[in-house]
Image (cartoon, helix red, strand yellow):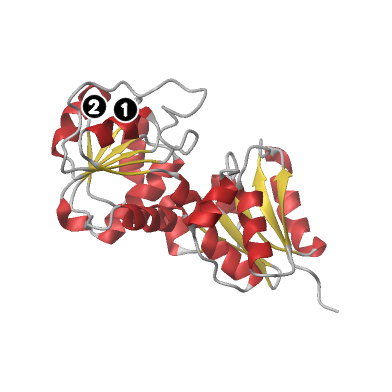
Amino acid sequence: MSKIPLAGVIGCPVAHSRSPVLHGTWLRQYGLKGHYVPLHVEKDDLPQVLRALPQMGFVGVNVTIPHKEAALALADIVSPMARAIGAANTLTFEEGQIRADNTDGYGFLQNLREGAQDWQPTNGPALVLGAGGAARAVIVALADAGVPQIWLSNRTRTRAETLQAEISAPITLIDWADWTQAAQDAALIINTTSLGMAGQPALDLADGLFNSGSVVTDLVYTPLETEFLRQAQKSGCVTVDGLGMLLHQAAPGFERWFGHKPEVTEALRAAVLGK
């Protein structure tokens, strides 16, 4: 009798993750055997846990903060995308080996193309706010898609300089004090910071910040409509919320673990939002 496949999300903390609801919805929708659970794992325990999970019937896991870089280092096989980004968010256990991938960039692009169907990589420069792990995934994806110029602005310039040095992409650094000026000439503007998230300070937004021809997206999805997106919409921009990135980045892992290619639908969005 074959084992029921298990998967989950590893983080510290992890109780806030919407991934169990997301994968659980797909499992029920497609009538598949399997379970997806949250796994709170401390930093020091990660190597031992990853080696033990396959013996317990786990076929793979998602990895979230603060384990993405460590998971990459512990993997036996690393995808080109995970290597380029320098972090893993999707692990698959096969034949005693840990395979690491990063689907964040894929999720970002799928969400962007779904929400802004007229956007093309050749439309012009992309302005990326933030220089954390999400920004790395976004920048690699944009460069791979053929965006000619990527402007990067971060509150701490040294962190942006490190990202620029470590990633092969057409990156130009913009001082944090000057990003609002750069936004006037950007075809695409992406907030990858936590600014504007529930419980966090808001981005400092000036009147007339956005050019009506720009596409504006925020990786924050709590709240779904941030002040950043609200102002962009008022200026006539096409706006894309951050929830779709979460949904689309989950699909490749689900297909690998449970053997079914899932769809991202409005019903799925509603389920993940608890509606």
Of residues 245 and 155, the one drawn nearer to the viewer in this rendering: 245
Mark 2: amino acid: Asp
The structure residue drawn at horizontal position 72% and vertical position 42%, both measured from the top left corner, is 41
Give x and y (percent) for residue 53. 76, 58
The structure residue drawn at horizontal position 39% and vertical position 22%, both measured from the top left corner, is 202
What residue would you read off at disc 2? 175
The structure residue drawn at horizontal position 64% and vertical position 67%, both measured from the top left corner, is 257
Give x and y (percent) for residue 55. 80, 63
Q: Left or right: where does residue 2 sit relative to residue 21? A: right
**Viewer can see residue 154:** yes
Of residues 216 and 103, the one drawn nearer to the viewer in this rendering: 216
**Viewer can see residue 102:** no
Of residues 146 and 36, the one drawn nearer to the viewer in this rendering: 36
Mark 1: amino acid: Arg
In the picture, which quadrant includes the C terminus? top right
Q: Left or right: where does residue 142 sit relative to residue 245? A: left
Where, by quadrant of the figure, is residue 191 drawn?
top left
What residue would you read off at disc 1? 157
Density class for disc 1 (Cα within 10 Å; few <14, some 14-19, many ≥20) is some
SS under mark 2? loop
Density class for disc 2 (Cα within 10 Å; few <14, some 14-19, many ≥20) is some
- The correct choice, above or below, for 211 with respect to 106 in the image is above
Which comes sooner in the sequence, label 1 or label 2? 1
Give x and y (percent) for residue 268. 55, 55
Residues at discs 1 and 2 in contact (Cβ within 8 Å): yes
